[in-house]
Amino acid sequence: MIKTRIGKLRRRLKQEGLPAILITVPANRFYLSAFTPEDGQAGESSGALLISQDAAFLLTDFRYKLTALAEAVYYEIRLCPAGQAQELAELSRDLGLKKLALEEGGLLFSQWRQLEKNLPGLELVPAGGLVEDLRQIKEGAEIEAIRRSLELMEQALMQTMSQTAAGRSERALALELERAVQDLGGDGLSFPAIVAGGPRGAEPHAQAGGDIISPDSPLVVDVGAAHKKYMSDITRTYLEQGREGFKWKEVYATVRQALETALAGIKPGMSGAQADALARRVIEKKGYGPNFGHSLGHGVGLMVHEAPSLSPRSRQQLLPGMVFTLEPGIYIPGWGGVRLEQMVALEETGCRLLNRLDHFYNE
């Protein structure tokens, strides 16, 4: 699998006239090598890949030597006691490189400048999204890993929400969800849990805080699990039975209809904007257009937010093998919000739902 991915990248490099590329985005590094260590804070690196048509190196340091030898089996491991930039300079001379593509999304400006200083005479050019383009089309094993991550999150969500959330703080509920994922065998949450009750639910990415959850207001819970590097993302909105008012019923029904319309209507060949419009039209017809201010969905894989984008501005073509979310929502300041989110794999005939948790509010 790794060998095949390297081959695909080399073909893309040849098409773009690029003799070599330096891989520094952590998700791309894992995708192309199976090297699992994470980077530390911004500017720190556990390793970088140098890939040309005839060579493949993993540049790392003593801390990760044994892991690199065990995991990155298609790479020559080069330790960098003087730093990656110095080692890269020597390798570039040995390989006779005149041009090197860099992942601008995986380097700080200071790191780019350091490479320029250490690589005089070597033309450094942006790589664009070469590896991200490859990652958009998921292999069968990747889809299964994502589905397993989603299954863990759904199980954790069902366990945690089996009792009323009212009376607990948002932060306490978020911690319970994280512990449940870990207890089930997951690596933890794929992003900090969004748990937002009442008026705070009108902020789509509200962080879980100390507010006590009320039984009389909607509760938005947006969570995802990480499992063997692959991510999931799911949102449900809860309200205790018997406390529904007209506004809740109308808003919830509208969001649910928008979700089902998108799920049934998205087909390969559509643009991200066309897919987004399927759900957006439903919400606009009910008069809530201004209250749906984010995109319909996004790709999920080794990162919880990756290509493709299903937004009003996206011209990207949706293709079989892509995995993405569908998450319409309506947000009303002073009242709260409703968002429902499913994950799908796009196939030749349309969307295949990856969720097994088919429970929505009161159903």
Image: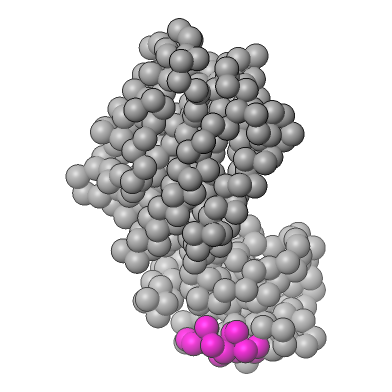
Where residue 3 appears, as percent x and y from the top left, is 40, 80
Residue 17 lies left or right of residue 65; in this view the side is left
Residue situated in front as seen by the camera: 247 or 303: 247
Q: Quadrant of the C terminus?
A: top left
Where residue 283 appears, as percent x and y from the top left, is 41, 18
Inspect this view and state whether residue 206 appears: no
Which residue is depicted at the point 53% across and 16% down?
290
Residue 226 lies left or right of residue 66; in this view the side is left
Residue 330 lies left or right of residue 88; in this view the side is left
Residue 202 in which image quadrant: top right
- In the rendered image, the vertical position of residue 268 relative to residue 34, given as above or below: above
Q: Is residue 72 magenta?
A: yes
Q: Is residue 51 magenta?
A: no
- In the rendered image, the vertical position of residue 268 relative to residue 54, given as above or below: above
Q: Quadrant of the N terminus?
A: bottom left
Q: Residue furthest front?
A: 163
Colouring method of the image? one colour
Which residue is depicted at the point 58% across and 22% down?
215
Where residue 110 appears, as percent x and y from the top left, is 79, 63
Residue 335 in which image quadrant: top right
Which residue is depicted at the point 54% across and 88% down?
70
Where residue 139 appears, as percent x and y from the top left, is 34, 64
Residue situated in front as seen by the camera: 33 or 186: 186
Q: In this picture, which residue range is highlighted in magenta?
A: 65-78
Which residue is depicted at the point 59% across and 51% down?
178
- In the rendered image, the vertical position of residue 17 relative to residue 277, given as above or below: below
Inspect this view and state whether residue 9 appears: yes
Q: How many marks?
A: 0
